[in-house]
Image (cartoon, rainbow, N blue to C red):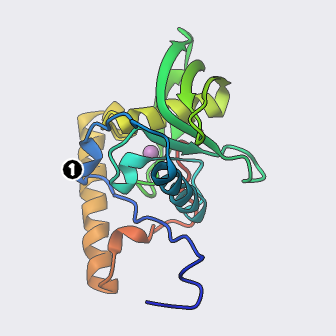
């Protein structure tokens, strides 16, 4: 395990996979934005980029605190950090878009979301700011805030679809455990898995 790089390289967190019951936990607010929190943020960003996701909620890495990281840029170098996000406004206008989730690999389906939102959150320095978002960013913020409430996007789908997804993912996890032995949940079966991809 100990390599010369291990002191300086931040390792990605393992990502919980649906239907892991830990994804249902409600996250608690962060009391102080300190070094401990910044370390979590840093490792969440590494995890999100490594998994080729555009967003990640702390809940998905089994940390039940209100922390979200997002990067919807094409360049993959515009990280956003939302700590203790509060929804101030959501547009009455909604649109149905295709979403995926790093915790539900290989599954994409339509979810209806507000097309624009306004959110207040702390950044990694503890500064409060307001984010006005529309389009992909708005969808991503809503998707990630759901995670903090213990809600995975498949909850918006029909019970039948949800059951199919549950069965499929459990089977995939069993097969991965049998084939690989180690950490089945870490290895998505698809090449591109985007969190909240429209
Ligand atoms: Ni997700």
Q: Which residue is drawn at 47% across and 46% down?
A: 108
Does residue 157 appear anywhere in the picture?
Answer: no
State whether residue 66 is above or below residue 163. above
Farthest-out residue, top: 92
Q: Which residue is drawn at 30% across and 42% down?
A: 161
Does residue 185 appear anywhere in the picture?
Answer: yes
Q: Quadrant of residue 61?
A: bottom left
Q: In which quarter of the image is the C terminus?
A: top right
Q: Is mark 1 on a helix, strand or loop?
A: helix
State whether residue 140 is above or below residue 9. above
- Image position of 185 (left or right of 45): left
Residue 177 pos. (x, y %): 28, 78
Residue 191 pos. (x, y %): 56, 67
Q: Which residue is drawn at 26% across and 66% down?
A: 171
Q: Quadrant of residue 114?
A: top right
Q: Which residue is drawn at 25% across and 62% down?
A: 170
* Residue position for label 1: 21
Residue count near mark 1 (Cα–Cα under 10 Å), binned few <14, some 14–19, many ≥20 = few
Residue 35 pos. (x, y %): 51, 52
- Which quadrant of the figure shows ligand 1? top left
Q: In which quarter of the image is the N terminus?
A: bottom left
Residue 182 pos. (x, y %): 32, 82
Judge by depth and name the residue closer to the eye, 12 or 17: 12
The total of numbered circles placed on residues is 1
Asked if disc 1 is less than 8 Å from ligand 1, the answer is no
Judge by depth and name the residue closer to the eye, 112 or 27: 27
- Image position of 49 (left or right of 102): right
State whether residue 187 is above or below residue 193. below
Farthest-out residue, right: 75
């Amino acid at each position: 395990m100990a390599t010369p790089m291990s002191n300086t390289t931040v390792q990605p967190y393992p990502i919980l996979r649906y239907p892991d019951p830990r994804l249902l936990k409600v996250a608690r607010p962060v009391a102080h934005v300190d070094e401990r929190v910044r370390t979590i943020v840093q490792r969440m960003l590494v995890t999100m980029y490594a998994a080729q996701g555009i967003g990640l909620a702390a809940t998905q890495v089994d940390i039940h605190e209100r922390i979200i990281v997002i990067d919807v840029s094409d360049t993959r170098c515009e990280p956003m950090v939302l700590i203790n996000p509060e929804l101030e406004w959501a547009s009455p206008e909604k649109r149905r878009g295709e979403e995926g989730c790093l915790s539900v690999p290989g599954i994409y389906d339509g979810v209806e979301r507000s097309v624009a939102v306004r959110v207040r959150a702390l950044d990694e320095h503890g500064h409060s700011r307001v984010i006005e978002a529309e389009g992909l960013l708005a969808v991503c913020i809503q998707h990630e805030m759901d995670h903090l409430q213990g809600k995975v996007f498949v909850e918006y789908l029909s019970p039948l679809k949800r059951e199919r997804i549950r069965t499929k993912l459990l089977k995939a996890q069993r097969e991965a455990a049998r084939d690989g032995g180690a950490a089945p949940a870490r290895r998505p079966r698809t090449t591109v898995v985007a969190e909240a991809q429209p």
